[in-house]
Amino acid sequence: MQELNWFMWGLDLFSGLFLIIVGFGALAIVYMYFADKLQTKQAVRHNYPVIGRFRYLFEKQGEFFRQYFFAQDREELPFNRAERSWVYRAAKNVDRTIAFGSTRPLDSTGTIMFMNTAFPTQDEDTTPIHPLTIGPDCKQPYTTKAICHISAMSFGALSRPAITALSHGAAQAGCWLNTGEGGLSPYHLKGGCDLVFQIGTAKYGVRNEHGHLDDGKLKEIAAHPEVKMFEIKMSQGAKPGKGGILPGVKVTEEIAKIRGIAQGHDSISPNGHIEFKNVGDILDMIARVRDVTGKPTGIKAVLGDVQWLEDFCDEIERRGEASAPDFFTLDSADGGTGAAPQPLMDYVGLPLKESLPILVNILIQRGLRKRIKVIASGKLIVPSRVAWALALGADFIASARGNMFALGCIQALQCNKDTCPTGITTHNKKLQQGLDPRDKSTRVANYNHNLHHDLALIAHSCGVKEPRQLRPSHVRIVLESGLSVSLDKYYSHINQ
């Protein structure tokens, strides 16, 4: 009898709660109805009160459903599932083989294919990657064996644990880490890896109160033995003609101190360096940074109009080869960033497939190819894309998003909102808790080791002893007819 009483009491309780919930639900619907009818900002909600709200809900959830349910393995942008899957497996150092056949269409216009030889390179005939020296005439030249490196990512755009993991991972992999334009943070230095200090248009970390370059601060940065080179960023692939953008929500007290800006306010870099009015000014700054630091100094740009590049080479000829930059980091128009205006990201600049051959060709014609090392950047996250860039004349590649995937990035496309669910691009302490720098640094190192390993697989199948020996003749590209033609037909001049 007592059990029956408890049952009846519980039933009454749940019935009462159900009625309360239904009541609140009805009140909420009434409230939403009048709120929708009285507002005039959103026509759908006004004309279809309550149910019109589902339109905005579905729009918000669309990215999620496309990513996980509707997009095929090779369809999604900016990186498809097949590419991300390879990076994830490389970072975890698990089996990277696949079964039953490729899902990659081989007859689509623009598809690249590498030409294997009947006599692939045997294991005993392979040679280690030949080390290259950047800035051999500098007081402190830089030599590295690695081909693949970590591209520019600022502390601010990325979180503290993410930068820490990248620093330790780069040290384990033996590659460099570019600081990005946000200045040198303690987290870049934590792992003891080689660093490339980037000087953006706002010159964070090396600027005076007027926004000009400060020689004293330059010397302080160069005094760190980890800092091996300096990169003057003129433009970036995702936002050519526009400076860096860090939303105010991500400008914490620590970031504001490092950058020398106000906390909580948008960090907007100028569109260009205030010192640059002509190509001579660019060479002047290169010379100044190189003289002050004693270390290799280069530039970073995405190509659009190439006339300035011709003028740049003319000025180098007038001043002498020693005035040239030690390296040129070429970014692609489809490069990534945490925040950029959509018109610039979608429509401005040349993609790497056009700009890389243009740059290499100009340097060859001007006799500067050996003097200026070429670093290619922009969606080069898998071995095939790296091999293609090397075949077209790049000396090194640098990837940001590939290493973000290695950190655990799921391409949630929330980098600019401080809501990154993996803790990589947010300063929300709660969201950062799942990013363990010790675990993720190992994954970054694994990714870079396996990227080099599988890059060598392609090179050896083409019959060369190491990846930098790849040439345009090793690559074919599919035309509109569905048939392919050797890239040597278009780029026979590339013969490093």
Image (cartoon, helix red, strand yellow):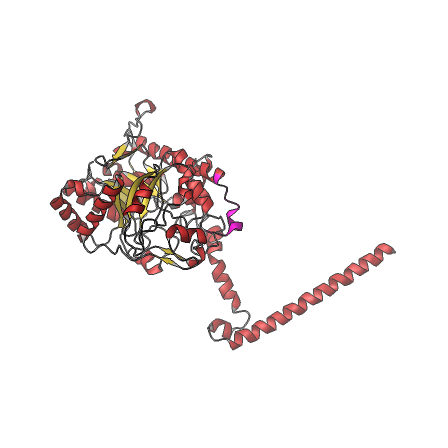
Image quarter where the N terminus lies is bottom right
Q: Residue furthest front?
A: 216
Question: Is any part of residue 84 visible from this angle?
Answer: no
Q: Is residue 408 magenta?
A: no
Residue 343 visible to an observer of this rendering: yes
**Which residue is outermost to the right?**
1
Is residue 216 or residue 170 the one in the foreground?
A: 216
| Residue 102 coordinates in the image, percent (x, y) | 40, 40
Work out whether 417 lies above or below 127. below
In depth, the one of 436 and 80 nearer the eye is 436
Range of residues picked out in magenta: 426-437
Residue 216 position, x and y percent, is: 29, 46
Q: Nearer the viewer, residue 49 or 436?
A: 436
Q: Residue at x 27, y 43 (%)?
A: 477
Identified at 31% across, 41% down, the residue is: 222
Residue 380, picture quadrant: top left
Q: List x then y, in percent, for residue 284.
A: 20, 48
Most extreme residue toward the top is 124
Compared to residue 23, the image places residue 377 above or below, namely: above
Seen at 19% across and 47% down, the residue is: 283
